[in-house]
C-alpha cells in the first residue's frame, strides 16, 4: 500500500536561505508524486508533480523536487526562501485514483 | 477560468444537527473527490465520484455521512446527527480523467470548515 512520510513537522529557515522539505514514500508500483501548499484557512494549491520522465521537476514559486527511486524520496527544495513561502506543505502519492498525504510540514521564515 | 468552489466556507452547528456542504468542480472535470482534514494533519480521503457514480467510500465515512453528485456536476456532502469529532475542514477536489490519462491532477477548493459545538 502506498504511504507518505514527511520528516519534520516544523521547519524554520531564514529569509534567503535554502528550503529543504523531506518526503519519503512507499509504493508497490511506480508512484505519481505531488507537493501541495496550503496557506492559512485555504485549500491546497499544487506546487509540482512527478509522473514519468525527468526526475527533477520544477514547480511554481521557484520550488523544485527530485524523484529518487533508489532512496524512495521526493524532497522539495527552494534555493532562497521568501517570507511569502510561509505555509504548510504536503507531499502526496496517488493510490487507486485517490491521494494519500503525509502529515504535512509547517514552514516558518525568519526575517 | 473558475476553480473549484465550496459553500459555505464556515459552518458552526450544535451537536446532533444535520449539515450539508456543496462543491462545484471545474466545469469540464468528470471526477470529484471529498477529503477531510483535521488540525495538524494531512487530508484524508472520504469518497469520490466519476460523473454521477460514487465509485469508492472510505471507512472514515460512517453511516451518518452521505454524498451525492446527482447530475455529474456539483456534489453535496451531508452529515447527519453531527458529533464534536466531525469538526474538521472538508475539502473538495476535481480532476479530469480519461482513457489512458494516468496523470490526472486534483485541484482543490478552499474547503468548508465545520465546528460542532
Image: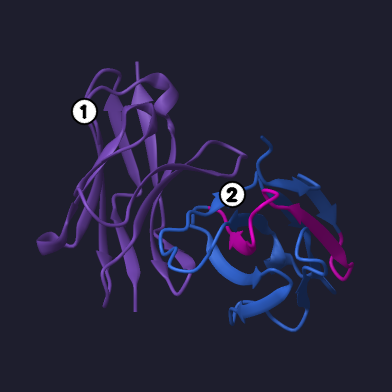
In the image, residue B73 lies in the stretch drawn in magenta: no
Q: Please give the chain letter of the residue carrying mark 1.
A: A
Horizontal and vertical percent position of residue A75: 23, 47
Q: Badge 1 is on which residue? A: A18
Foreground of the two, B114 or A78: A78
SS class, disc 1: loop
Horizontal and vertical percent position of residue B24: 75, 51
In the image, what residue occupies the spot 60% across and 62% down? B35
- Colour seen for chain A: purple
Horizontal and vertical percent position of residue A17: 22, 23
In the image, what residue occupies the spot 34% across and 69% down? A3
In the image, what residue occupies the spot 30% across and 61% down? A5
- Colour seen for chain B: blue
Range of the magenta residues? B14-39
Q: Badge 2 is on which residue? A: B108
Tell me, yes or no, whether dots 2 and 1 are on the same chain. no
Q: Please give the chain letter of the residue carrying mark 2.
A: B
Q: Considering the image in quadrants, where does the C terminus of chain B appear?
A: bottom right
**Can residue B117 be spotted in the picture?**
no
Q: Is residue B71 above or below residue B2?
A: below
Foreground of the two, B73 or A10: B73
Amino acid at each position: 500500500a502506498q504511504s507518505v512520510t514527511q520528516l519534520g513537522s516544523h521547519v524554520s529557515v531564514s529569509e534567503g536561505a535554502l528550503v529543504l522539505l523531506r518526503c519519503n514514500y512507499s509504493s508497490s508500483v511506480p508512484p505519481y508524486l505531488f507537493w501541495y501548499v496550503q496557506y492559512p484557512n485555504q485549500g491546497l494549491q499544487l506546487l509540482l508533480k512527478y509522473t514519468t520522465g525527468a526526475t527533477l521537476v520544477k514547480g511554481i514559486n521557484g520550488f523544485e523536487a527530485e524523484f529518487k527511486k533508489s532512496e524512495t524520496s521526493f524532497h522539495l527544495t527552494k534555493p532562497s526562501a521568501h517570507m511569502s513561502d510561509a505555509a504548510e506543505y504536503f507531499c502526496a502519492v496517488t493510490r487507486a485514483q485517490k491521494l494519500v498525504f503525509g502529515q504535512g510540514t509547517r514552514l516558518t521564515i525568519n526575517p | 477560468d473558475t476553480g473549484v468552489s465550496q459553500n459555505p466556507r464556515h459552518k458552526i452547528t450544535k451537536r446532533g444537527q444535520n449539515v450539508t456542504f456543496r462543491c462545484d468542480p471545474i466545469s469540464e472535470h468528470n471526477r470529484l473527490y471529498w477529503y477531510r482534514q483535521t488540525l495538524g494533519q494531512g487530508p484524508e480521503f472520504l469518497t469520490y465520484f466519476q460523473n454521477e457514480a460514487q465509485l469508492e467510500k472510505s471507512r472514515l465515512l460512517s453511516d451518518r455521512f452521505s454524498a451525492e453528485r446527482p447530475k455529474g456536476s456539483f456534489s453535496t456532502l451531508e452529515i447527519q446527527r453531527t458529533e464534536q469529532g466531525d469538526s474538521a475542514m472538508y475539502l473538495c477536489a476535481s480532476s479530469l480523467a480519461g482513457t489512458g490519462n494516468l496523470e490526472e491532477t486534483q485541484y482543490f477548493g478552499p474547503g468548508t470548515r465545520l465546528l460542532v459545538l
